[in-house]
Image (cartoon, rainbow, N blue to C red):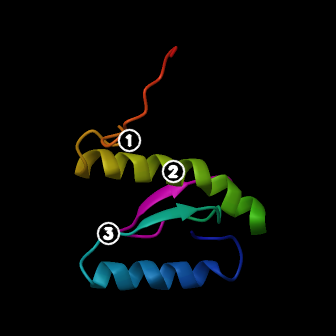
Amino acid sequence: LRPAGPMAASAAALAQTCLEAGTQPVVFDVSGEAALPGALTIALPRLHGLASAIAVLPALQQLLIRIAMQRVERVGEPLRSTKVTGPE
């Protein structure tokens, strides 16, 4: 999460560390500033505090679901369920 204000610099430093380690960081950006070079930036409206964290949740959820779908076959499907639904 790249927040607006003085904390944005720490996100830039972390993204740079990721790039130096050989991985492309994903940055959820609510700073309203230009994208960080080399990072995959998901730009969101400029917000502060708790509002910025809440705004990130839907995008973060979609990212995690799509990653899971690439790595796990039949993601989200119950595999070990003995529940029987219907009239008894």
What span is colored magenta in the figure?
Answer: 35-47
Which residue position holds label 1?
A: 76
At label 2, which amino acid type do we have? Answer: Gln
Q: Residue at x 61, y 77 (%)?
A: 8
Which residue position holds label 2?
A: 61
Check disc 3 and report its element: helix, strand or loop.
loop
Distance, label 2 to label 3, CA atoms, is 19 Å
Q: Is residue 42 visible?
A: yes
Dot 3 crowding, Cα within 10 Å, few <14, some 14–19, many 20+: some
At label 3, which amino acid type do we have? Answer: Gln
Asked if the residues shown at circle 3 and circle 1 are in contact, with their CB atoms under 8 angstroms apart, the answer is no
Q: Residue at x 48, y 85 (%)?
A: 13
Check disc 1 and report its element: helix, strand or loop.
loop
Ranked by sequence position, the earlier of labels 2 and 3 is 3
Residue 34 appears at what percent x and percent y? 54, 64
Asked if the residues shown at circle 2 and circle 3 are in contact, with their CB atoms under 8 angstroms apart, the answer is no
Ranked by sequence position, the earlier of labels 3 and 1 is 3
